[in-house]
Image (cartoon, rainbow, N blue to C red):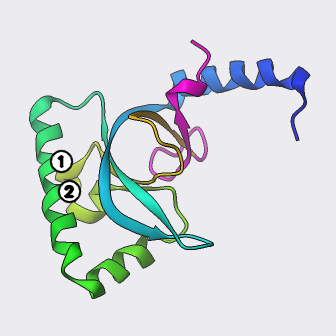
């Protein structure tokens, strides 16, 4: 457990890591609920802030159509929940293919419109291990 003296160092380390490895995303509400230890967690659609308007629109439309289809198909919803598992981030490329680069489905443990996704390790840009709300950042 970190003490009060370690907090500033932790923030400095987080700031460096975010600048080096972070992916900033804008999030939107989602109708999908994901299995959790007790009950379910909400999910959010996330789109990288660096993608263009056209790609962001395509991602949002793909998620909207997909989520609309899930509402009427219990088997598909169950399959998605199993695929998501305990992860915090599911890249849209796993759902829609390589043309969906820049989109994500998140386990919404933090309610913020802007988040930073951090890879599990510095070299791994696919498996995200941390989702940091921007109000925790030191700027």
- Local packing at callout 1 (Cα closer than 10 Å; few below 14, some 14-19, many 20+) is some
For label 1, the SS is helix
Q: State the separation of the CA atoms marked 2 and 1.
A: 5 Å
Whether 83 is drawn above or below 105: the answer is below
Q: x and y percent of residue 93 in the render?
A: 28, 56
- Mark 2 touches mark 1? (CB < 8 Å): yes
Q: Is residue 55 left or right of residue 119?
A: left
Q: Is residue 55 left or right of residue 106?
A: left
Q: Can you identify the residue that label 2 sits on?
A: 63
Name the residue nearer the viewer: 42 or 116. 42
Q: Residue furthest top?
A: 139
Name the residue nearer the viewer: 138 or 109. 109
Q: x and y percent of residue 63 in the render?
A: 20, 56
Whether 59 is drawn above or below 95: the answer is above
- Local packing at callout 2 (Cα closer than 10 Å; few below 14, some 14-19, many 20+) is many
Whether 120 is drawn above or below 15: the answer is below
Q: Is residue 11 left or right of residue 71?
A: right
The residue sitting at 62% across, 16% down in the picture is 138
The residue sitting at 61% across, 21% down in the picture is 15
The residue sitting at 31% across, 49% down in the picture is 29
Mark count: 2
Q: x and y percent of residue 81 in the render?
A: 41, 74
Q: Can you identify the residue that label 1 sits on?
A: 60
Name the residue nearer the viewer: 76 or 17. 76
For label 2, the SS is helix
- Which quadrant is home to the N terminus? top right
> Range of the magenta residues?
120-139
Whether 68 is drawn above or below 109: the answer is below
Q: x and y percent of residue 125 in the render?
A: 46, 44
The residue sitting at 49% across, 31% down in the picture is 22
């Amino acid at each position: 457990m970190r003490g009060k003296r370690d907090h500033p160092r932790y923030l400095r380390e987080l700031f460096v890591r975010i600048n080096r490895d972070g992916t900033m995303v804008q999030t939107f509400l989602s109708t999908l609920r994901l299995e959790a230890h007790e009950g379910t967690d909400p999910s959010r659609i996330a789109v990288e802030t660096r993608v263009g308007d056209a790609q962001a629109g395509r991602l949002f439309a793909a998620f909207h159509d997909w989520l609309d289809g899930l509402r009427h198909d219990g088997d598909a919803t169950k399959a998605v929940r199993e695929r998501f598992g305990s992860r915090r981030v599911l890249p849209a490329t796993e759902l829609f293919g390589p043309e969906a680069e820049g989109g994500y489905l998140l386990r919404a443990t933090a309610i913020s419109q802007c988040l930073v996704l951090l890879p599990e390790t510095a070299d791994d840009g696919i498996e995200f291990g941390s989702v940091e709300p921007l109000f925790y950042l030191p700027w």
